[in-house]
Amino acid sequence: MKTFHIYKSYKELPSSWDDLVSHDVFLQTTYLEALEQATPSNIHLFYIGVFNNDTLVGAAIIQRVQLYLKDMFRKTTVSCIKEFFKDLVSRVLKGNVLVVGNLMHTGQHAIYFNENQINQTYFFNAIFQGLDVLIKQIKETHGKKIRALIMKDFFVGDTILKDKRILKTHGLYEVAVQPNMILPVPEHWSSIDDYIKALHKKYRHRYRRAIKKFGAIQSKELDLHFIEAKSKTLHQLYLNVSNNAKFNTFILPKNHFYSLKLKLKENFKVFGYFLEDELVGFYTLILNEQHLETYFLGYDAEHQYPNQLYLNMLYDMLEFGIENRFSSIVYARTAMAIKSSVGAKAVPMVLYMKHTNTIMNAILKPIFALMNPKQNWVERHPFK
């Protein structure tokens, strides 16, 4: 008999959970514990376990997101967002949304099932049954109506979705989103020198120019105690970048990086950039089996352009990935042009969504297209 169970904390998850999802750190209880202890204030986590008799055969991570204007539209120095656009988006999406996925990271890190013990149709039907129950529980317990349902960040042709008809049956439709920028690391690369040798002359010069502009800035891995002591500084550097986004759905709390380092230990890396002992930038990495996942970063705007902090971060992430024998560097979405110039390839992604109101559902797709505008950027080809 195939059943499902809803959990409201990582503490409630069955002991077999980590065995099922051992391939992905973002699904494991150490990460989920860290996330629960340092999640944005407008996000609450739930989990669904799918069982075949008494055996756990499938898992899903759900985020209830409370979207409000102060979270969606920040003070941005990039451009003014027209009032009609704010009003339109807020009317459609403002309120409670259920996300099958992780808003804090690019990629499909929310669902998994054992194909040898359950097929796709049974799994997704169980998940949607669980979502229906969860929606009712949220209404009864919190008095909040779920306005939209989103299943996020699938690669086009993802094998976990061999038959998309199951999603159409439940009223979801497909929407293209910005691609995931991924750099495959050739097996014969053992150091950054191998990467440099593989570049066209133009991009070798670009690399060396960036290193030169880095100047007297020093890079150093930060330990748990430093991260805790400098949580306020790290958070402000993160906000310097986050607040420039035209549209966003959350703000990380100050203890987020500390919580991840505390729980993930060596699977979470924080590297700081120092100029005369002043922390002027940082980036974070999550070690996920053979994939090096880039995470949040931050920098002081005063040093970003003169010292090319962001470009140097991309190169440093790559160097770490090469030296530690990762098969790919997952640079995630945004800033596609500069990531492409480093060597990352754009891998198309889609999400699936529906609005609980039929009329709103009809205009949700074009609204979401506005939220994820197609960027006119030219793919670079830095390798010989």
Image (cartoon, rainbow, N blue to C red):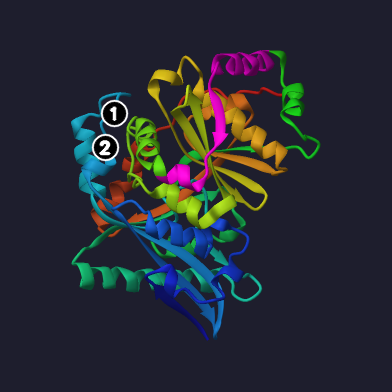
Q: Does 256 appear above or below 208?
A: below
Does the segment drawn in magenta span residue 294? no
Left or right: where does residue 144 sit relative to residue 241? Answer: left
Question: Where the C terminus falls, by quadrant?
Answer: top right
Confirm whether the magenta stretch covers residue 203. yes
Q: Look at mark 2 in the image and give the residue it sits on.
A: 73
Up the image or down, 189 lies above or below 360; here it is above
Residue 361, x across and y down, in percent? 30, 53
Determine crowd level at label 1: few under 14, some 14-19, many 20+ residues with C-alpha closer than 10 A. Answer: some
Q: Which mark is residue 379?
A: none
Residue 61, image x and y in percent? 45, 63
Whether tag 1 and tag 2 are in contact, CB under 8 A, the answer is: yes
The amino acid marked with disc number 1 is Thr
Identity of the residue drawn at 33% across and 44% down: 251
Callout 2 crowding tier (Cα within 10 Å): few <14, some 14–19, many ≥20? some
Residues drawn in magenta: 202-228
Give the left or right position of residue 140, taking residue 244 as reference. left
The residue drawn where x is 52% and y is 53% is 108
Q: Residue furthest right?
A: 188
User: Where's residue 141, x and y in %?
Assistant: 22, 72
> Disc 1 marks which residue?
76
